[in-house]
Image (cartoon, grey):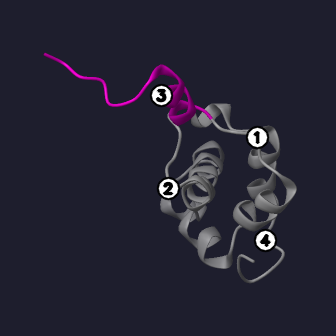
Amino acid sequence: MSTRMFSEDQLERLRSYPDIGRDDLIRYFTLTPADVAFVDPGRGRGPADRLGLAVQLATLPWLGFVPDQVSAAPPVAVARPAERPRRSGRA
């Protein structure tokens, strides 16, 4: 007998991104110099791979997990890591 651990609503929340507020966007999706070094193009990653990795890297501390549908990240959450870092660390 199979038992479900999560309801359909819980599964949907794990598969997708919630709305993100301005404070969380700035706090979690501003890349640190260490983040930038980690996604460095010199490691054989193309632009799309680097951006996807940066979004996942920022999402993990924000939500505590990375949703299944990374491509469904809010546009502002994708645009923010695409910018150059402006400060030395996360607030």
Please identify the residue farthest to the top as the structure is shown.
1
Upstream in the sequence, badge 1 or badge 2? 1
Q: Where is mark 1, residue-wise?
A: 19
- Looking at the rendered structure, the secondary structure element under dot 1 is loop
Q: Amino acid at mark 3?
A: Leu
Q: Amino acid at mark 1?
A: Asp
Question: Spatial distance from mark 1 to mark 2, Cα to Cα?
Answer: 32 Å
Q: Where is mark 3, residue-wise?
A: 11
Give coordinates of residue 26: x percent, y percent.
81, 64
Give coordinates of residue 73: x percent, y percent.
68, 38
Q: Where is mark 4, residue-wise?
A: 85
Please identify the residue farthest to the left as the structure is shown.
1
Q: Where is mark 2, residue-wise?
A: 44
Q: Residue at x 65, y 49 (%)?
A: 51
Upstream in the sequence, badge 4 or badge 1? 1
Q: Which residues are magenta?
A: 1-16
Of residue 61 and residue 42, the one placed in the foreground of this image is: 61
- Looking at the rendered structure, the secondary structure element under dot 2 is loop
Please tell me whether mark 1 or mark 2 is closer to you in this view: 1
